[in-house]
Image (cartoon, rainbow, N blue to C red):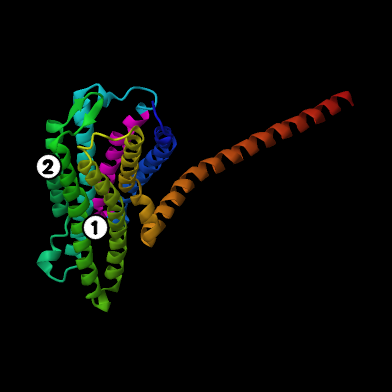
Amino acid sequence: MATTNLPYMQQQMIRYGMSTYFGLGLAGNICNCIMFTRPLYRQTPSSIYHLSDSIFALFHLIWSISPLFYTLNYPDLQKQSILYCKTRLYGSHVLALLVRYIIACACLDRFFATRADVRLRSLSSFKMATILVFVTCIVCILIGIHIPILMEIRGTICGMFGIYKLIYALYQILSVSILPPALMIVFSALTLRSLHQRHGTQERTKRKDRYLLRMIIAEVLVTIFTSIPHSSNLIYGAATYYNINKSTQRVELESFLTFITQFLIYLLSVAPFYLFICVSKPFRNEFINLLVKCLNKCMPRQNQIMPMNIQNNTTTVNGSITLVQATKRHFN
């Protein structure tokens, strides 16, 4: 039995907060998929990275958050099935890695695209983007294979136990919190340096690259913001794992803080579309134009129906007047 209100608060956050998160994430990633197949963006190799990132983020939300809704009314399947226990965390972990490392690849592409060296600039291509996305998928799938091998159920808990809990915390800190943000920061800084070295005759291209870089930097900042609390919680959990004298209140508090850090982790799969709208004027204008075109396609249909209704009403009125006149002539 719960001794604090934290489990109830967590349940309400899943019911209302996560559902809002889920809806905004699905809508935003679907809009991203549409936007990065538009002519304005599909001409650049970076569209491959953003499109792939949106698809992976979409699957990440569906795979990770949907089971939380199920647990609101039914028992958690992770506590009952060892297969589900292993595959759920493994799938969620791989998709989260893909979301981060695809952003790092996008930073690398911007670095290549802004270099003066022709050989380096040629690496910013659709072929290279496709290869990097494919290789990233293979690496992320393989690098997390230890999760389904070493995870297990003890009692009613699906998780890591013993020395593996500490190893997993260190692995998460390195693979999620240090390496992706470091790669993003280095390549973004080099790209900014290249943009400042551009000549004035390339001002139009420079402006386009700057807006694309703004979009990527916004994702980098969200990555850093969400990674720090998650890593801190992992370090704390590993450091206090062997403390068996925890009170019930402390266990509930730790469980709630873990939930909060996971809640923040999903932000990287929810926020990109809304960040792009805020930081990129071309992206915002293109999205508005797309909405206007969709509305214009719907409006003519209404305009075509209205005259027909008016015409039918006019015919009915004229027919009634003619009938009245004929009746008057008959009686006269």
Give the CA distance from mark 1 to mark 2: 30 Å
| Amino acid of disc 1 | Thr
Left or right of 164: which side holds 256?
A: right
Quick check: can you spot residue 151?
yes
Asked if the stretch drawn in magenta spans residue 67, the answer is yes
Circle 2 sits on which residue? 143
> Mark 2 packing: few (<14 Cα in 10 Å), some, or many (20+)?
few
Circle 1 sits on which residue? 44
| Amino acid of disc 2 | Ile
Up/down of 137 relative to 126, above or below: above
Q: Nearer the viewer, residue 203 or 17?
A: 17
Identify the residue shown where x is 62% and y is 36%. 309
Residue 152 location in percent, x, y?
A: 17, 28
Q: Label 2: state its secondary structure.
A: helix
The magenta segment: 42-69
Identify the residue shown where x is 17% and y is 68%. 115
Examine the residues drawn in magenta and state their main secondary structure.
helix
Q: Nearer the viewer, residue 131 or 93?
A: 93
Asked if the stretch drawn in magenta spans residue 65, the answer is yes
